[in-house]
Image: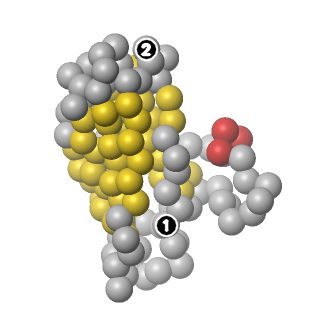
Amino acid sequence: MPSNPFRVTLTAPSTTGGFGSMYAPDYSVRPFSVAVAVTTTSTTVSANVEHTYDYTGSSAFISSNAVWFVSSGVSSATGNSQMGYSFPVTAIRLNINSGSSAGATTMTCIQAG
């Protein structure tokens, strides 16, 4: 049974960027499949979807200490974008690289299985 959609929205990004809450999919589900969509109402936002393989199931996990990889599917996106993960990852997050106008950028993740 598919999971409920996970959504995180960042509004009025600063010119230095910022991170949203991370989504931790169930990486034990086989086959692994997560759809990711990024939508924005700003014309000046540049966004990445990033993932990590670090273990997130511990209370000692600190997001800023994890090794994050920029997805090739949504990299420096300036408009609505989508991608899919077909390989297991432990966490996915939205990273706003830059933006100079008010608006909202939302990442939605849905895991199959």
Quick one: SS at disc 2? loop
Q: Give x and y (percent) for residue 83.
A: 27, 53
Which picture quadrant has residue 6? bottom left
Among numbered discs 2 and 1, the one appearing first in the sequence:
2
Identify residue type, mark 2.
Thr
Name which residue lies at 36% across and 59% down. Answer: 109
Name which residue lies at 29% across and 27% down. Answer: 103
Identify residue type, mark 1.
Pro
Can you say whether 28 is above or below 80 in the image?
below
Q: Give x and y (percent) for residue 90.
A: 56, 61
Point out the image quarter for the N terminus: bottom left
Q: Give x and y (percent) for residue 46.
A: 33, 26
Characterize the local packing of mark 2: few (<14), some (14-19) or many (20 or more) Cα atoms within 10 angstroms: some
Of 3 and 90, nearer the camera is: 3
Q: Which mark is residue 25?
A: 1
Disc nearest the viewer among 2 and 1: 2
Quick one: SS at disc 1? loop
In this view, which residue lies farthest toward the right? 60
Can you say whether 85 is above or below 28 in the image?
above
Q: Mark 2 points at which residue?
A: 15
Q: Work out how far the residue at label 2 is from the one at label 1, CA to CA, in angstroms.
A: 30 Å
Is residue 89 in sight in this rendering? Answer: yes
